[in-house]
Image (cartoon, grey):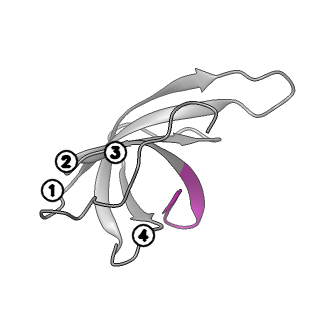
Amino acid sequence: MARLRPGREVRIVNLSRGGACVEAVSPLRPGHPVDIRLMLPDWQWREAQVLRCHVSALPHEQKVRYRAGLEFVSPVAGGGASGAQAQGPGE
């Protein structure tokens, strides 16, 4: 799990030193900056930019889910993403 400022929770789908793929219940606007914080020890708020966003799921009687690609403004230093595990759909 991660949080975007000012308080929107997102689910981490994939994480690398250069960015992340996240899933949210509301769309993120491509080209806009966001601040992201992973729920990991020693992880501080990081600046990122939304590269793309699309509908990823239309579950029956639930909220639409969106998947967004984020690029970190500055790559995570060695090991900064350690401890984070990618989650597959439905996890």
Measured as percent of width and height from the top left, residue 77 is found at 13, 64
**Circle number at residue 75:** 1
Work out whether mark 2 precedes mark 4 in sequence or the reverse, and give the earlier one.
2
Answer whether labels 1 and 2 touch (C-beta < 8 Å). Answer: yes
| Residue found at x 49% / y 25% | 54
Q: CA distance from mark 1 to mark 2?
A: 5 Å
From what the image shows, is residue 17 above or below residue 79?
A: above
- Position of 69 with respect to 4 (left or right) is left
Work out whether mark 1 precedes mark 2 in sequence or the reverse, and give the earlier one.
2
Judged from this view, the residue extending furthest toward the bottom is 42
Measured as percent of width and height from the top left, residue 28 is found at 49, 41
From what the image shows, is residue 66 above or below residue 25?
A: above
Quarter residue 20 falls in: top left
| Residue found at x 57% / y 30% | 89
- The boundaries of the magenta stretch are 1-10
Work out whether mark 4 precedes mark 1 in sequence or the reverse, and give the earlier one.
4
Element at badge 2?
loop
- Quadrant (top left, top right, bottom left, bottom right) of the C terminus: top right
Q: CA distance from mark 2 to mark 4?
A: 17 Å
Q: CA distance from mark 3 to mark 1?
A: 11 Å
Element at badge 1?
loop
Q: Which residue is mark 3?
A: 20
Measured as percent of width and height from the top left, residue 74 is found at 15, 59
* Amino acid on which the number 4 mark rests in the picture: Leu
* Amino acid on which the number 1 mark rests in the picture: Pro
Element at badge 3?
strand
From what the image shows, is residue 51 above or below residue 39?
A: above
**Circle number at residue 40:** 4
Q: Which residue is mark 2?
A: 18
- Position of 69 with respect to 74 (left or right) is right
